[in-house]
Image (cartoon, rainbow, N blue to C red):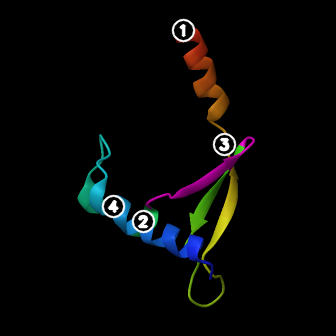
Amino acid sequence: MCDAVTLLGESQAAAKKNFWWPFTQHLIVLQDSVTVIDSRCGESFAVYQPGNKRDTAAHLEMQYDACASWWTQVTLLLV
């Protein structure tokens, strides 16, 4: 496993320990449910996926940013 993916895996624990999310019951947030975003490319972003011990190694998965245009439109309306 490359060092970057290892660091992203460690980021889940660090985020759970150090970040505060408004309107969230922090005690019920599972560490594996913390979404770690590595980078963005066009309309997609790379999300860390921890994988499982048997079938899949930890990796980055590209996901489409479906909300980006909505937030852009809200911002343009407010300006």
Q: What element carries label 1?
A: loop
Q: What stretch is highlighted in magenta?
A: 34-43
Query: Looking at the picture, which amino acid does disc 4 mark?
Result: Lys
Image-based side of 3 in relation to 45, left or right: left
Outermost residue toward the front in this view? 3
Residue 53 image point, x, y percent: 56, 88
CB atoms at circles 3 and 2 under 8 Å apart? no
Query: Mark 4: which secondary structure?
Result: helix
Q: Which mark is residue 79?
A: 1
73 relative to 45, above or below:
above
Q: Tell me which numbered mark, 1 or 4, is placed earlier along the sequence.
A: 4
Question: Of marks 3 and 1, which one's residue comes earlier in the chain?
Answer: 3
User: Disc 4 and disc 3: Cα gap in Å?
Assistant: 23 Å
Q: How far apart are marks 3 and 1 (CA)?
A: 22 Å
Q: Position of residue 75 (x, y in %)?
A: 56, 18
- In what element is the residue under mark 3? loop
Q: Mark 3 points at which residue?
A: 65
Q: Are marks 3 and 1 in contact (CB under 8 Å)?
A: no
Residue 40 drawn in magenta: yes
User: How far apart, in angstroms, are the residues tagged by discs 4 and 2?
Assistant: 6 Å
Residue located beneath label 4 in the image: 16
Q: In which quarter of the image is residue 57?
A: bottom right
Q: Which residue is drawn at 44% across and 60% down?
A: 34
